[in-house]
Image (cartoon, rainbow, N blue to C red):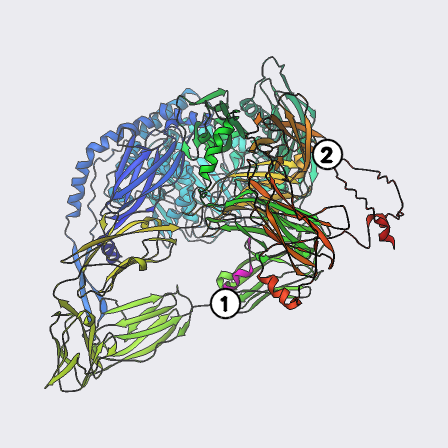
């Protein structure tokens, strides 16, 4: 560990918080402490912030900074201290920060009383005064501590065994270890023992004490007086648990007489000394002293006041009050373990120190638990007696038959006599070297124990004890009691209680703990006696407490204007219910009142908050409902519904009786602690996080007008409100102002914008935050352009011509309208529609369950402008699943998805999944069988869908008929989890458990031969990369150093031994758990060796010969290599031999000769790198091969390269910089420089590594600098709440959420929404949205659902944001009404048309919309004219053929089955330009036959577009023998040539071409003479097919409509009819009628 610390200290690194600060929640007046641990070199500078402001040391703020941690302590906190605190660490390499919030809650009345009591008794003053004194004494105590540490210490030698690789022998290192000598006791003050006159004892009451263990002998000694704990005799011989050692509940102190008050004053005086010592301890810890240092000071007798018996018992009491009874028990167990004699002198202090050492308990929390009563003699006696009894009983069995007798002795003695049936040896117990024993004997013998104290017992103690014991004797076995409050055992030794639970007393002789049996579950156990009251007392308590809480409930609404208010009234009372264990229960209550009452539900006196277990509804009919999803026996009791408004309140109560469990459901010990997370009243009344009362609606404003954005919310205390526009906070200006209004706890905030501009259009966000939390809401402002003036058209003609050559900027695809989830039945027609814009126009691909598909027989894909349609003619079960549209153009991509649920035959499971347990690497097959072959199943693991793309994870799918299988070839621990198979609404699940095998060797060590001076490598491979191995050399564990290193790469490990010598030969072994493998290192002595190896670098000059020479120990042949390739003799390379020396000569050295040269002699080698001196080259890098910007995923490695244009003669000097700071090579960052390139590699990239890296290269002639930018992409963070839900209809729900906090560095492409039906385990995707909202359809009325939202970017999907609340359509009780008004805006205006666009109304009236009605009104008239009725899926419409130069109003209204709702109207719209139809297309009209049944037509563009852009051409054809023209189709303006097919060979035809703009069609271009269709002379079908494939001209078909069937024939009508009537014509439907003059031909 020390070596690791040294390495870290030597490595420079940016600051990093290794222990972040934690959220805090305290009461007012308490201390708060934040602690952060950090690392960094150089040592970072630490700064603390509160709400963005720097904090400094002051009277109430203490900041301490140590080597690796920093603390912030806030003294006497108030509500102004609540908020966010931040700690920031900065050094020259970077910075890091950690952030947490502090919540300050108001004290309850009971806590305030305790606080004031402690303050009145002087305990708080003592602590405050002592803080100042301790600071002054600190220097003196430090000097004393130094003297103690200067004592002479003895030295011992410690041997350490290791292996010396060079000598091959074991060596022993001697290490001096200091052994501490016990410190001398330093007694500052010794308390004087004051002898007090003895008083005559008074008659006592004989009671049965708690049994002690049997003693071998009967012994009586003077000692401390013990107060007995009464114990009732029981005839049964059942063995039960001992009373728990948890903190007993605080008894409510009763009024006493004046003499008791005098005793308390004495106790307060006795408490001053110990409290000063405790204050001293607190100050030491606050100033950096450790718990061990405090303990050493105690052993040095620096706190003599704490060594007294009353202080020790008071410390035990304080520890127990913070719920750490277990600490006392642990200390006592340590003291008694294996000892026959034990001294209890330091038990209290040790328990206190143990508690303080635990992070969750701060010093102040323990100190405030000290009470003056703890120092009263009676309390001290009682606790000491319990302590002695516990010490005697430690490690012994429970007693079965017991009796006890208490005598109040004379003067200052209590004689305690106890008898038990046991055979246990006596343990001697002492305190401050005075023996305190409690002896036990056989059943026929009696033993007694006495303790002596040095102070007399007050007369009042006897009287008080007698009163309490007399009351205890009034209880009878079997008496019924009720729990006052919910009790949860901290250690599990006691039994939990739920408020109102009925129990029967079995044993009550312990003052603090009673042994009881529960009424319903019949569990038995110990519970705190103070929690139990008899029925009459409990009923009065519940009524009083309930009224108190109701009176304090807040009211948020007041009557408006002169409206008359009246108090709530219960019109339908809550009814009592009886339910079996595990059933669902509903309580319903109907109320009336004005203002609308607030509803609160209680169980007994506990306020119920909504949760998954307890669902609360309050609908518009004033029907309040409480649903308990699953009742347990503990839930039985009184449930009350309270309705309250500003006038008064009303309530109705009912009983819930839970029948005895009929199955295993109720037999488990169920801790229903959630009873709605039972809150104290302060949680409701004192603090409410901001909650928006209404969602702000979307606003539309005209440019130049004024607009007001509004939001309302409830909050306690008042919240801070901030508005943002496009993520930028809004500041008040002359044009934009923010106003806030308050009415009690209801707040309203406005943003007023004057002279609205187009740049004001966008998203506005309001954030309300108080100490309880924060909430966010968003709204959208749409800005429309001002109505155009009449003269504007003239001005706009010129700019149009100028802008024509300009190409619009590329825009990525945008999902204007996403796909909508659909539920249908088999055979239904299904339509999916999406609107996607982009420039250039994006290309689309459709996917079904992640598989690409195209139009087919049953599925067609169409598009019109920017709207894309998918139509399924007849839905089949195979069409069920997820549909996705991916749009892509040169600027980017976008996608939207939705789910189609096809409901057909009910598919069920024939064979379901079973749990599996296998060993690693075994084969797993999960198989189900369903009732239908024409269906697919979905597989999920731990809530995540398993797709075909996950085959690399070991999954494989199989389908054989009705059987479906999920196969895992080789199971690993990663395959362990819960698997769910679902089909339709059916599902089954199983658990797969994988038994992990012990790691083993998959590749073992082998013998390795190496030559002296070379490197030897041993390799192994293990089955698990994280398994720990140990390496040994000749049985001694290897210590790794620069000569021997272990390299781990996943499951592979390499042991590399460098510069091997003869002494290194021997056995090498590796152990893996209980497995091992061995190898051997064989070191061969070379026949020849190098006298001296080549230097790392050899220098030469350009144009000169370079000689490289080696000296050998004996003559032999050598081989020369260049960059790994053998060099042979040539004009370039010559070789010389002279005795034992060998030389290579490089003639006329050039840049191409710069390389690494190696000389090999036998089995030894040496190498050198050639560098050439001379005129250095200018450094130039290859820009085309270099990536200056890189974006990678978190955790990946990245390498930046600077490739040189040519190989350098000499390596240049390089320096890498990060944010202007030089980078040093480490394990994380590796830099490389060669003659060809310079590079840097950053491993495991984190967010701290992102930024600008600079490479600086230089030599004697040049210097360059290259910058690289590193950025990181990660998955986005989960979306956030609170989620907002609104029921549109009984099966449609609107869901909204808040965007992810971070997008991971890549834009969030979509949010995926999934639902799960309550009671099921699988999640199903219902759709995706690029917005922060979605509409979910197809929900079942009687089912409940949970929802989750997942954010997806280019890297992947975030963790899901799961909405805790459960939603049920049946509880919504949606009223059917007229729909609301849609929001309408004008999208485009031309000379003869207007395009309007609208959004659906937020309120659909509780049912689905049937469509929209579009109307227009000319400005000079008051009459509205209906234009069109469109389907509910349409959101955009163009009104054509309008009168030029006119002004119109347009309005759109929604329609449902109830009727038509209010209309939303546009502002006045002025038609902009004067235009006319275009001129005819330009002649000539070229017609060419291309076959016996087809011809091509080609024409020119019209000379004039009529003042409006051309929209396309219409083509019409007429048979020369007939008079009717048939339109065969329309084409775009780009098409001026097309093919007309399906003509009759030999027939003659006329053809017309019309040009069209927004005004209408031009006059036609027509052939003057009919054109006869003839077969071309060289026509063949093969040639025509080839020509057709290469012809890009579009084709249209001409049909005479002659057919063998018609609607006339189907109606059994004659051909000579003259009239026809169609009855039952439906409103809103369109009908087309056709009459053929040649109809008689159809009936031939």
Q: Quadrant of residue 28?
A: top left
- Residue sitting at 34 percent across and 30 percent down? 198
- Judging depth in this view, the residue of 773 and 574 nearest the camera is 773
- Residue sitting at 70 percent across and 52 percent down? 875
- Judging depth in this view, the residue of 1394 and 1314 nearest the camera is 1394
Magenta residues?
A: 943-952
- Please say whether residue 944 is one of the residues in the magenta stretch: yes
Check the image and name the residue furthest to the front.
1569
Res 104 seen here: yes
Q: Position of residue 717 (x, y in %)?
A: 46, 26
Q: Position of residue 248 (x, y in %)?
A: 47, 37
Dot 2: what SS? loop
Looking at the rendering, in which quadrant would you find the N terminus?
A: bottom left
Q: Which residue is mark 2?
A: 1457
Q: Is residue 1508 above or below residue 1418?
A: below
Looking at the rendering, in which quadrant would you find the C terminus?
A: bottom right
Tell which circle, 1 or 2, labels the residue nearer the N-terminal end: 1
- Residue sitting at 74 percent across and 57 percent down? 1544
Q: Would you say 1616 lies left or right of 1124 here?
A: right
Q: How many residues crowd mark 2 within 10 Å: few (<14), some (14–19), many (20+)?
A: some
Q: Would you say 1484 lies left or right of 773 here?
A: right
Q: Which mark is residue 920?
A: 1
Res 248 seen here: no
Q: Position of residue 325 (x, y in %)?
A: 42, 42
């Amino acid at each position: 560990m020390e070596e690791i610390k040294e390495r870290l200290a030597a490595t420079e690194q940016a600051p990093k918080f290794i222990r972040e600060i934690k959220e805090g929640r305290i009461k007012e007046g308490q201390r708060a402490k934040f602690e952060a641990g950090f690392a960094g070199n150089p040592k970072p500078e630490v700064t603390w912030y509160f709400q963005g402001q720097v904090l400094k040391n002051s009277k109430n703020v203490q900041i301490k900074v140590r080597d690796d941690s920093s603390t912030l302590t806030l003294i006497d906190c108030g509500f102004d201290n609540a908020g966010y605190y931040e700690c920031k660490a900065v050094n020259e390499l970077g910075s890091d920060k950690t952030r947490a919030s502090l919540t300050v809650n108001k004290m309850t009345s009971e806590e305030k009383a305790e606080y004031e009591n402690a303050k009145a008794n002087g305990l708080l003053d003592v602590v405050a005064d002592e803080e100042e004194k301790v600071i002054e004494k600190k220097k003196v105590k430090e000097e004393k501590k130094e003297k103690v540490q200067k004592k002479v210490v003895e030295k011992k030698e410690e041997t350490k065994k290791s292996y010396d690789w060079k000598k091959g022998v074991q060596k022993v290192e001697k290490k001096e270890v200091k052994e501490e000598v016990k410190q001398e006791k330093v007694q500052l003050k010794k308390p004087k023992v004051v002898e007090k006159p003895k008083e005559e004892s008074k008659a006592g009451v004989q009671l049965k004490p708690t049994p002690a263990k049997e003693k071998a002998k009967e012994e009586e000694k003077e000692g401390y007086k013990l107060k007995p704990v009464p114990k009732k005799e029981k005839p049964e011989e059942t063995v039960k648990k001992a009373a728990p050692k948890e903190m007993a509940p605080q008894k409510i102190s009763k009024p006493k007489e004046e003499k008791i008050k005098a005793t308390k004053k004495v106790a307060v005086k006795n408490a001053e000394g110990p409290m000063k010592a405790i204050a001293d301890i607190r100050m030491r810890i606050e100033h950096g002293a450790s718990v061990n240092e405090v303990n050493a000071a105690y052993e040095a007798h620096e706190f003599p006041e704490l060594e007294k018996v009353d202080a020790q018992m008071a410390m035990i009491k304080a520890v127990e009050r913070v719920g750490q009874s277990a600490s006392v028990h642990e200390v006592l167990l340590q003291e008694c373990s294996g000892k026959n004699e034990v001294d209890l002198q330091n038990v209290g202090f040790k328990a206190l120190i143990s508690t303080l050492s635990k992070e969750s308990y701060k010093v102040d929390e323990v100190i405030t638990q000290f009470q003056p009563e703890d120092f009263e003699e009676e309390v001290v006696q009682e606790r000491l007696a319990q302590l002695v009894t516990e010490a005697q009983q430690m490690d012994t069995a429970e007693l079965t038959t017991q009796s006890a007798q208490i005598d109040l002795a004379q003067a200052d003695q209590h004689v305690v006599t106890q008898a038990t049936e046991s055979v246990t040896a006596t343990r001697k117990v002492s305190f401050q070297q005075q023996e305190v024993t409690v002896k036990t004997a056989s059943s026929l013998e009696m033993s007694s124990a006495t303790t002596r104290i040095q102070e007399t017992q007050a007369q009042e103690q006897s009287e008080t004890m007698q009163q309490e014991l007399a009351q205890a004797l009034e209880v009878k076995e079997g008496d019924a009691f009720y729990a006052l409050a919910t009790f949860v055992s901290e250690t599990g030794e006691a039994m939990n209680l739920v408020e109102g639970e009925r129990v029967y007393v079995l044993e009550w002789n312990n003052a603090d703990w009673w042994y009881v049996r529960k009424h319903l579950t019949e569990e038995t156990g110990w519970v705190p006696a103070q929690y139990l009251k008899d029925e009459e007392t409990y009923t009065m308590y519940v009524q009083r407490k309930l009224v108190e809480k109701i009176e304090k409930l807040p009211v948020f609404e007041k009557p408006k204007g002169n409206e008359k208010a009246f108090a709530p009234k219960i019109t339908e009372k809550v009814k009592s219910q009886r339910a079996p264990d595990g059933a669902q229960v509903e309580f319903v209550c109907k109320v009336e009142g004005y203002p609308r009452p607030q509803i609160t539900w209680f169980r007994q006196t506990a306020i119920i908050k909504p949760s998954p277990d307890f669902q609360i509804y309050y609908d518009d009919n004033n029907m309040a409902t409480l649903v308990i999803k699953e009742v347990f026996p503990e839930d039985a009791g009184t449930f009350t519904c309270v309705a309250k408004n500003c006038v008064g309140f009303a309530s109705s109560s009912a009983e819930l009786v839970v029948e005895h469990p009929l199955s295993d459901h109720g037999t488990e010990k169920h801790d229903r602690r959630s009873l709605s997370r039972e809150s104290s009243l302060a949680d409701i009344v004192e603090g409410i996080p901001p909650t928006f009362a209404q969602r702000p609606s979307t606003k539309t404003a005209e440019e130049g007008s004024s607009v007001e954005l509004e939001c309302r919310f409830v909050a306690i205390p008042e919240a801070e409100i901030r508005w943002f526009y496009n993520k930028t906070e809004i500041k008040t200006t002359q044009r934009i102002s923010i106003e806030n209004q308050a009415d009690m706890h209801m707040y309203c905030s406005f943003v007023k914008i004057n002279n609205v501009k187009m740049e004001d259009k966008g998203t506005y966000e309001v954030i309300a935050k108080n100490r309880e939390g924060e909430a966010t809401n968003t709204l959208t402002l749409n800005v429309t352009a001002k109505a155009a003036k009449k003269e504007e058209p003239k001005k706009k003609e010129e700019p149009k011509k100028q802008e024509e050559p300009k190409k619009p900027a590329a825009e990525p695809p945008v999902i204007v309208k996403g796909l909508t989830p659909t539920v249908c039945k088999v055979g239904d027609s299904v339509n999916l529609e999406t609107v996607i814009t982009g420039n250039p126009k994006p290309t689309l691909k459709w996917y079904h369950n992640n598989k690409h598909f195209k139009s087919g027989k049953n599925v067609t894909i169409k598009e019109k402008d920017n709207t894309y349609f998918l139509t399924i003619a007849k839905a089949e079960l195979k069409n069920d699943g997820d549909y996705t549209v991916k749009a892509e153009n040169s600027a980017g991509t976008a996608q939207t998805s939705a789910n189609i649920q096809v409901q057909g035959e009910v598919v069920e499971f024939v064979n379901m999944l079973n749990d599996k347990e296998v060993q690693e690497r075994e084969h797993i097959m999960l198989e189900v069988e369903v009732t239908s072959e024409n269906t697919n199943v979905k597989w999920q693991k731990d809530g995540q869908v398993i797709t075909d793309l996950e085959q690399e994870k070991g999954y494989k799918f199989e389908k054989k008929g009705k059987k479906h299988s999920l196969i895992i070839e080789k199971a690993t621990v990663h395959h362990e989890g819960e698997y769910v198979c679902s089909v339709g609404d059916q599902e089954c699940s199983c658990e797969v458990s994988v038994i992990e095998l012990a790691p083993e060797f998959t590749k073992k060590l082998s013998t390795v031969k190496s030559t002296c001076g070379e490197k030897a490598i041993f390799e192994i491979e293990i089955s698990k990369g994280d398994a720990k191995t140990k390496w040994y050399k000749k049985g001694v564990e290897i210590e790794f150093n620069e000569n021997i290193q272990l390299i781990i790469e996943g499951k592979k490990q390499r042991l590399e031994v460098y510069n091997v010598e003869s002494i290194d030969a021997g056995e090498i072994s590796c152990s893996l758990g209980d497995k091992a493998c061995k190898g051997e290192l064989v070191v061969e002595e070379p026949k020849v060796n190098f006298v001296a190896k080549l230097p790392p670098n050899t220098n030469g000059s350009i144009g000169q010969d370079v000689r490289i020479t080696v000296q050998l120990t004996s003559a032999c042949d050598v081989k020369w290599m260049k960059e790994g390739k053998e060099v042979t003799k040539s004009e370039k390379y010559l070789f010389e031999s002279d005795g034992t020396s060998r030389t290579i000569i490089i003639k006329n050295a050039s840049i191409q000769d710069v390389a690494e040269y190696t000389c090999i002699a036998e089995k030894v080698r040496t190498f050198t790198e050639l560098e050439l001196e001379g005129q250095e080259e200018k450094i130039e890098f290859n820009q085309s091969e270099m990536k200056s910007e890189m974006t990678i995923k978190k955790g990946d490695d990245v390498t930046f390269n600077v490739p040189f244009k040519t190989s350098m003669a000499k390596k240049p000097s390089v320096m890498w910089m990060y944010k202007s700071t030089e980078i040093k090579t480490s394990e994380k960052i590796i830099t490389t420089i060669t003659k060809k390139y310079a590079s840097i590699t950053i491993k495991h990239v984190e967010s701290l590594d992102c930024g600008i890296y600079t490479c600086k290269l230089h030599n004697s002639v040049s210097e360059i600098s290259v910058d690289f930018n590193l950025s990181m992409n990660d998955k986005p963070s989960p979306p956030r709440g609170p989620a907002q839900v609104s029921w549109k209809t009984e099966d449609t729900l609107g869901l909204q959420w808040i965007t992810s906090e971070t997008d991971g560095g890549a834009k969030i492409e979509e949010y995926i929404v999934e639902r799960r039906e309550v009671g099921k385990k699988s999640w199903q995707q219902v759709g995706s949205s690029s917005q922060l909202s979605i509409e979910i359809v197809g929900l079942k009325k009687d089912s409940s659902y949970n929802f989750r939202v997942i954010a997806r970017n280019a890297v992947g999907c975030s963790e899901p944001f799961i909405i805790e609340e459960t939603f049920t359509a049946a509880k919504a009780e949606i009223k059917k009404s007229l729909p609301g008004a849609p929001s309408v805006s004008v999208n485009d205006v031309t000379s003869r048309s207007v395009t309007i666009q609208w959004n659906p109304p937020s309120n659909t009236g509780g049912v689905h919309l049937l469509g929209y009605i579009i109307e227009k009104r000319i400005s000079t008239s008051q009459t509205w004219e209906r234009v069109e009725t469109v389907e509910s899926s349409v959101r955009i419409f163009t009104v054509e053929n309008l009168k030029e130069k006119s002004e119109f109003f347009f309005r759109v209204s929604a329609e449902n089955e109830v009727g038509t709702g209010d209309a939303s109207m546009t502002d006045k719209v002025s038609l902009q330009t004067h235009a006319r139809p275009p001129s005819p297309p330009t002649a000539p009209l070229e017609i060419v036959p291309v076959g016996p049944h087809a011809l091509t037509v080609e024409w020119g563009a019209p000379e004039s577009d009529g003042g409006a852009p051309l929209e396309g051409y219409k083509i019409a054809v007429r048979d020369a023998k007939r008079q009717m023209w048939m339109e065969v189709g329309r084409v775009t303006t780009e098409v001026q040539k097309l093919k007309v097919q399906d003509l009759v060979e030999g027939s003659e035809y006329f053809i017309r071409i019309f040009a069209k703009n927004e005004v209408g069609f031009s006059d036609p271009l027509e052939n003057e003479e009919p054109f006869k269709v003839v077969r071309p002379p060289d026509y063949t079908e093969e040639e025509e097919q080839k020509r057709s494939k290469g012809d890009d001209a579009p084709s249209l078909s001409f049909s005479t409509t002659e057919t063998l069937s018609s609607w006339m024939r189907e109606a059994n009508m004659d051909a000579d009819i003259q009239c026809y009537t169609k009855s039952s014509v439906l409103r809103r439907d369109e009908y087309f009628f056709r009459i053929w003059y040649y109809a008689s031909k159809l009936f031939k």
